[in-house]
DNA sequence: GCTTCACCTTGCCACGATGGGAAGGTCTAA
DNA sequence: TTAGACCTTCCCATCGTGGCAAGGTGAAGC
């Protein structure tokens, strides 16, 4: 890897698929890779490092757009940590919103499922709820 | 609505947008709507009821595919409630999986954000974590 | 009758993130 | 030299939803 590697190795080393590396390049999230004489993309340690950064951020659920901002801050020596923290807090809030939404769904479904016999009979409060109980 | 309505009214009455009603028709989730002489889609109470069913199911997070199955069961008088319950339980499990995943993300982010000063200085454990602390 | 406005039609494009596959070029080891 | 692993680009699919454009229709008011 000291001498640089092709996209497959970069993918393996970073955990980002080759497919997605090309995609990130195309949308401008990462710079255009250097190319070998035959046109193969070449990656050195810094690029692989960036890819690992992206992978980590994706694992934490940041969107590509947010990751673009995070990369900018990462590479900006004069950043304020408050900017990074603001991004993180916004993402936390968004996660919380989605978690709450899903927990609401789950609670309702559990309530309905508990009322459903789950046998060979057709009566089912789950369907009744979906159909609008009052009908 | 007794005399049937156009797609806009059906959308309003069901909570499903006109756009999505057309989409659901196109992908076969619902049958092809009757048409007026001039080609306008016409909806009667049963179709609107089906749309409301779909809306409810979407609100509970069921996928279109799952809703197709639920609609089939709903309209099948000889269904077993166990089939409905199985669908619901599978969806609950999926929700749980996603909730757990997001809660993991959230916990990590909260830990990192807590360690971040969030001031004008560049040092930031959030970026350090994304970059792989060991580097 | 005519205008106006709200509504309808179809068709295409977009998102976000990812995967699949085809058709063709390249590199390496046997 | 050949096989197989790897690379390239390009297009398509997912899932659910929205937007826009170009054109037709219906009803109300003048």
Image: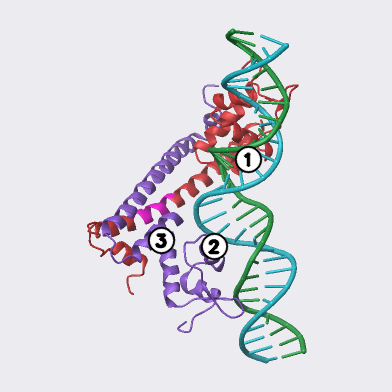
Chain colours: A purple, B red, C cyan, D green
Mark 2 lies on a secondary structure that is helix
Determine the secondary structure under disc 1. Answer: helix
- Mark in front: 1 vs 3: 3
Give the x, y percent position of residue A121: 60, 33
Distance from the alpha carbon under mark 2 to that under mark 3: 19 Å
Q: Nearer the viewer, residue D14 or A71?
A: A71
Of pointers 2 and 3, the one earlier in the residue sequence: 2
Q: State the residue at coordinates (63%, 39%).
A: B68
Q: Are marks 2 and 3 in contact (CB under 8 Å)?
A: no
Residue B102 magenta-highlighted: yes
Image mark for residue A57: 3
Q: Give the x, y percent position of residue A96.
A: 36, 46
Question: What whole-number distance in Å separates the C-alpha atoms at marks 1 and 2?
Answer: 39 Å
The image quadrant that residue D25 belongs to is: top right
Q: Chain of mark 3?
A: A
* Co-location on one chain, circles 1 and 2: no
User: As displayed, is residue A30 above or below residue B82?
Assistant: below
Residue A113 in the image: above or below residue B6: below
* Start-end of magenta stretch: B99-107
Q: Can residue A123 be seen here?
A: no
- Mark 2: give few (<14), some (14-19) or many (20+) Cα within 10 Å: few
> Which residue position is annotated with label 1?
B69
Q: Mark 1 and mark 3, same subunit?
A: no
1 or 2: mark nearer the eye: 2
Q: Name the mark on residue A44.
A: none
Seen at 58% across and 40% down, the residue is B82
Q: Chain of mark 2?
A: A
Q: Is residue A119 above or below residue A21?
A: above
Q: Main secondary structure of the magenta part?
A: helix
Depth check: C30 or A32 in front? A32
């Amino acid at each position: 890897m000291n001498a640089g590697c092709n996209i497959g190795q970069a993918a393996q080393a970073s955990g980002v698929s080759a497919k997605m590396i090309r995609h990130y390049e195309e949308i401008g999230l990462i710079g255009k890779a250097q190319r070998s004489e035959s046109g193969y993309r070449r990656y050195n340690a810094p690029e692989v490092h960036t890819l690992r950064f992206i992978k980590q951020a994706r694992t934490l659920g940041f969107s590509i757009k947010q990751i673009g901002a995070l990369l900018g801050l990462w590479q900006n020596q004069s950043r304020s940590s408050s900017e990074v923290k603001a991004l993180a807090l916004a993402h936390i809030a968004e996660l919380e919103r989605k978690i709450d939404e899903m927990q609401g769904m789950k609670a309702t479904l559990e309530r309905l499922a508990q009322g459903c016999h789950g046998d060979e009979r057709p009566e089912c409060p789950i369907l009744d709820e979906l159909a609008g109980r009052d009908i």
